[in-house]
Image (spheres, coloured by chain):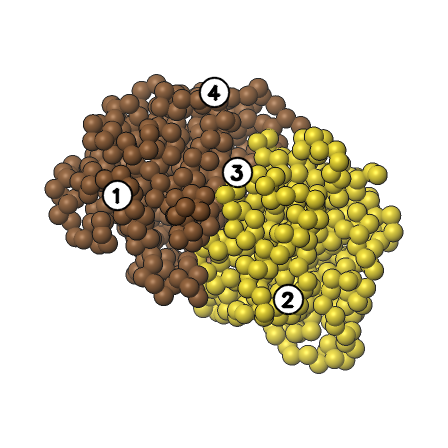
Amino acid sequence: MKPHNVAVIGVGQTAFRSRYDGLTYPELAQEAVMLALADAKLEPGQIDAVVFSMAPTTFMGVADADKWAVDYTWARGKPFMRVHTGGATGGSALQAAHAHVASGQYGTVLVVGADRITETPDAQFVLNLIWDPFYEQDFALNTVTMTAVATQRYMHLHGTTEEQYANVVVRARRNALKNPSAHLKGAIDVAAVMNSPRISWPYKLFDICPRSAGAAAVVISNETLARERCTRPAFITGTSGVSNTVFMGDRMGPFADTDFADFAELKQAARECYRQAGITRPIREVQTVEIYDPFSSFQFPQLESLGFCESGTAQRLSDEGAFDMDGELAVNPSGGTLCTNPIGVTGLVRAAEAARQVMGRAGDMQVPNVHNALATAIGGSTQFFTVTMLSDEPRRAAA
Amino acid sequence: MDVYVMGLSIHPAADVIGDTRLEEMAYRTARAALDDAGVKRAQIDHVTLAGSDEIDARGITSMLLAAPSGAYLKDEMRVTDSGLTGLLLGAMRAASGDLQLGLVVSWNQSSVVPLEDIGRMRAEPFFLRPVGLNFAIAEGLFAGAVAERHGVSEHAVAERVRLRLAAAARNPRAVKRAVPGPDAIAASPLLAHPLRSAHRPPVTDGAVAMVLASGDWVRANPQKKPLARIAGAEWSVDRYQLDGDRLASLDLFRTTLAAVLERAGLDSVDALDVVELEAQSAWADVALVDALNAGSGVAVSPSGGAWAQNPFFCTGLVHAAEAVLQVAGRAGGHQVAGARRALAHGTSGFAQQTHGFVVMEGIEA
């Protein structure tokens, strides 16, 4: 049985900010659904199934928030499932929805999620609870200290400087100026990043993403429906993921399959994604990427492992402007996760922004002539990875 | 669906599995499913997990469970609704064209957590949580609603408990229990009127795994014999509110059942040989069997259903495994002779907010 081609035909996202005190969680999710349905020019009744994108519920303290949101997202009476892979949740949820349509089970699927990280007074305390209670929770492990360790290792291997990471922040905040949904944005310089308060070496405050509240939704259809409903759909031409062990100590040394400094899992995921999408020279064939970068140090190893440049060269290329909006590869035109991080939907926002680039609907963020746009998401102890390719045409004949 | 079950494993069930870490339970179950299918982990190209952070008492339970479940350096994702939902997603992934051979793994070790407190934390914080809603109260509301709407009696409920436990006694994978007398059931503590403690199947620890393959993989590997074909799958969610009509109408159960039968190309429920229903109380069991409206030729819950074992989060997936074993002729003491098509059912959410169904079809020799 031949699989169906699948395309994004509508996206919606609220503005992201620290708090939404005027809306409940399901009302926030509903805002994004209404925007996505309007973008797709669909009514709720035209949605066949719903995939809910929701990461740890402990930030908000309502474990069944997805089921609470059923009526608000017009999911009642429909197939409905929640996907949760930590920070990679949005990427996994879109890929789960892709399976709904590619398998031929459903024609049109809505992916929706919301998050309100600031509902908890200390998100990093909550994030400490994701680790093993016997061996790891008693260390000062949270997502900041965890990735700071990996960053130190990357700096040791490649001689990266704090200023080079600061330059990534400057570019992200500058790009976000053109994104009406971005949480943080502004014209800042390297000195401002360097002078922001030290958090965990080498991170300063500005090297770290904000805690965001907001919602996002994406509508996907099979190729037949997508061509009827959308003049320029964004076809999902590659979907892949890789999960690694939780233990960071097992991801370094002579016997390790991967090294936690360079996100080598993405090499495997990208290889499969490119195979599906028919991509052989990513730097030539992909015009823009929306990569998951909650920390300034997340861009270089991702760009290298995704095959856009050789190992250890991303920092120099970044300094030279290769990843600016008018550079060789426009990296995170939206400002990326560094500027906006509603964890449960961040991966979905990455894919939504990539889709908008392909659809020509990115507004002031638009990169010219986008044929392929790539989105990533990362979760767990930087152990869950997804890679999704959005393209202007499908890469295989229609089912 | 052009998707096949190649092998499966059900972890030995017990009220408490206290000498084994959850990771070990998942590993042993996934390992046994691969062995049952006669395939190596290296051949697997994707893994679909189903687990609950709250029951496992971790923020992201798959962080620790993914690798022992076979997902180390594999394309893995997780659902949180129920084990059966993992099967539904795993089947769609196997049918999506780019993935061929996958594992579905789900687990439950709720003996070490206060399940009703977890239920309370699932409720929205404005109305339901302050009134103390938990699984027992939601089930009690359901029981009251079906008693009033459908005339389900406490006597019928007690007899259903005894019927299921008697069936479970023939199931080699069941936790062994005595069949209580009607008086003992009637004298058991009242949890939430009219629900009594003996009306609920005891929650057990357990795990279950399946190996799924695309039709392309099966045709390319003719030496590997599938246990069953997934002939159809459907699932749906009801509204969150627990009003009388939502509880008692059973509309969602009926419409989703009709949809899965249509998917499987079946005219009616009587085209099935076996149905394994998930009911978290005997009140639900009576109401759902009535709504099923099956003739006498259909064996309903021959395994004993949740009274055989009830690893709360993955009971529906256990039922799917039981359905596979029935059509493969491997069920054991409760084997239904000549079973060709078996329907598995699972639920999740307060008072069965969701219903999921999978039709398993036997493979001709």
Disc 1 designates what residue?
A155
Q: Position of residue B156 (x, y in %)?
A: 77, 68
Distance between mark 1 and mark 2 Cα atoms: 49 Å
Disc 2 designates what residue?
B204
Q: Residues within 10 Å of mark 4 (few under 14, many from 20)?
A: some
The answer to whether residue A184 shows anywhere in this view is yes
The answer to whether residue B137 shows anywhere in this view is no
Q: Can you say which quadrant of the picture contains the C terminus of chain A?
A: top right
Disc number lying in front (2 or 3): 2
Badge 4 vs badge 2, beta-carbon distance below 8 Å: no
Total numbered labels: 4
Which residue occupies 35% across, 40% down?
A262
In the picture, measured across the screen, residue A50 lies left or right of residue A34, that is: right
Q: Colour of chain B?
A: yellow
Chain letter belonging to callout 4? A
Q: Which mark is residue B349?
A: none
Who's brown, chain-wise?
A
Q: Position of residue B192 (x, y in %)?
A: 60, 72
- Please tell me if label 1 and label 2 are on a single chain: no
Q: Residues within 10 Å of mark 2 (few under 14, many from 20)?
A: many
Q: Position of residue A287 (x, y in %)?
A: 35, 23
